[in-house]
Image (cartoon, rainbow, N blue to C red):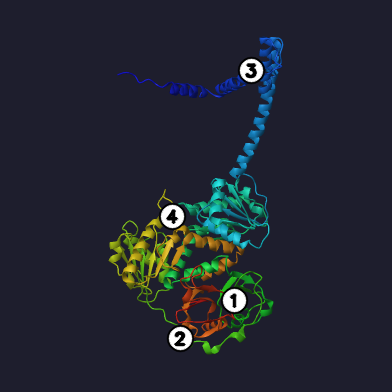
Amino acid sequence: MAQRRTPFGDRARYWFDSTLARGAAALVGWMALLSLAVVVPASAVMVWTDPDAPPSLAERLAEVWRLTGETLRLGGATGTPLRAMMSVLLALVTLLYVSTLVGLITTALTERITSLRRGRSTVLEQGHAVVLGWSEQVFTVVSELVAANVNQRGAAVVVLADRDKTVMEESLGTKVGSCGGTRLICRSGPTTDPAVLPLTSPATAGVVLVLPPDEPHADAEVVKTLLALRAALAGAEPRPPVVAAVRDDRYRLAACLAAGPDGVVLESDTVTARLIVQAARRPGISLVHRELLDFAGDEFYLISEPALTGRPFGEVLLSYSTTSVVGLMRGGTPLLNPPATTPVAPDDLLVVITGDDDTARLDDCAESVEKAAVASRPPTPTPAERILLLGWNRRAPLVVDQLHRRARPGSAVDVVAEPGEATIREISEAEADSGNGENGRNGGNGLSLALHHGDITRPETLRRLDVHSYDSVIVLGRDPAPGQPPDDPDNRTLVTLLLLRQLEEATGRELPVVTELIDDRNRALAPIGPGADVIISGKLIGLLMSQISQNRHLAAVFEELFSAEGAGVRLRPATDYLLPGSTTSFATVVAAARRRGECAIGYRGHADASTRPHYGVRINPPKRERRRWTAEDEVVVIGTD
């Protein structure tokens, strides 16, 4: 068989590539040849076309050499061969010196720019916020810190994570958007290295927030970061307050010890489970939580009001027209919704909901109360509940525990999960941990649990269940598997929601669904109705950390609000407070709630329950504002069950 002949062009290209592969010397040689191949003929053309060119060939060749030397900066001196060689040598030395100097300057500038791009320079700021770690929560935290600093000049937020600085800046710029007057600074490096943490100047920071990474061993990473921060701050006084979050309560004690006496450590899984259960028992409550926790609207503040000292708490509720009073801070301990007869002590701080820390102004609204519109019927009793729990993850036992704490006799929870997700042993342990008794059935307060095996992404699994017979349906995603993206469980959750939506359309009946998602971007993809309860665990914890970062004393307030036993946020039927169809002021609602031992802080209007962006939720409305109250409206109160 005849050998195929290689084209000349391919052979020439291969030979050229092979010479270039020999190194810098070959590259310099080719550049010299290419330059001479262009400059020498061009110089010859210029000499031969010059009317004043010398007549002899030798003189013309010398002129070509002179032009070539001047063009290539090779001296170009004429005369004896030795003189020409020395001219070329001096020119080469000059060229080498200038090239080396330019190269050194270029290298130094490149290294400096590369160092800046890598985020390895020290931040010189005062009173800035430092965010350590990277997870989905970082976008919420940074957004809220920017919103909190909207009225402050020279504010800065510094983010340190073991990621490329440019990638972090691009991600934050895309998801956070404009930062207004707040400067966003990113630094790259491991947060567990005490030698790296000084890049963020934590000793001069106003607050330090430690985020749990999206990894299986996130809690251990948080503890190591807190220890590294303590080492980096050794000898620094005063130390900035620290706000951190762990997932597992087993790490909370270690994290608290590492954070120090001024540190606040949240249990993200416990808080998420509490919010899921509250949303399951009262649809729409997650919208209220979001309104209370973000900085876009009114939020919690602690204020001092000496003029109210000695007055009973019940009178204080109507002492502000655009501020809602919900409790007292006494000696560092929050007293939310205390008895109306509780007097305000001289050192007490008022726990209020208002637009800003300077918008709480005394303005008595007692004259706006219309007693004729107040309802006198007893509160609506809470019946036994049936809850369907679709899916199982590490938060599921905590959800069961929260359901148990306020369950009415006869309540039941049915769990549907694949055999690999939940076992009889896990269900039994969840029942035992929640105090249901040794046999796990109808013990304690009467909450019963039952496990049904099935794939919740299969239509036949959901069809076998009478989903419309349940008071609430909770959809939980799987725990992320090692090596998978953190938001991978959302894919199965979206499929389950799509099947539930199909059942709603087939029967024409709406299902009260509470969904847990990891990535907030998937909320727009979820086939759910407007205003549905979607718990974005990372976002809620980010909102909570941001609020506490502005005032660490609010940590105790939020702990009380989100606990199962304390005075928390509740949604009640408006008919428990007002006569249906009455047109009256919100001050009347506050007075009616006070008679029931509660603090009214807002309402949810049924007419706007499907309208973005607030879905009918109004927090801290002016007390003199009048509206018509319907039987479908709900009142937001701070109280107990």
Image coordinates for residue 256, horizontal then vertical, percent:
55, 59
Looking at the image, is mark 4 or mark 1 earlier in the sequence? 1
The front one of 96 and 42 is 42
Query: Around disc 3, counting alpha carbons within 10 Å, would you say few (fewer than 14), some (14 to 19), or many (20 or more)?
Result: some
Disc with the residue nearer the chain's start (1 vs 3): 3
Q: CA distance from mark 2 to mark 1?
A: 24 Å
Left or right, 177 with reference to 395: right
Left or right: residue 517 versus residue 239 is left
Amino acid at the residue labelled 2: Pro
Residue toward you, 519 or 161: 519
Relative side of 113 to 433, left or right = right
| 334 and 573: which is toward the camera | 573
Which is more N-terminal, label 1 or label 2? 1
Mark sitting earlier along the chain (2/4)? 2
Q: Please say if the residues under marks 2 and 1 sit with CB atoms less than 8 Å apart.
A: no
**Residue 256 visible in the displayed image:** no
Marks 1 and 4: in contact by CB < 8 Å?
no
Decide which of tag 3 and tag 4 comes sooner along the chain.
Answer: 3
Residue 173: x, y in percent? 56, 53
Disc assigned to residue 487: 4
User: Does dot 3 land on a helix, a strand or a loop?
Assistant: helix
**Nearer the N terminus, badge 3 or badge 2?**
3
Q: Position of residue 500 (x, y in %)?
A: 35, 65
Circle 3 residue: 44
Please give the label number shown on residue 378.
2
Q: Quadrant of residue 555?
A: bottom right
- Select label 3 or label 4 by which is in front: 3
Which of labels 2 and 4 is toward the front?
4
Residue labelled with disc 1: 325
Q: Secondary structure at mark 2?
A: loop
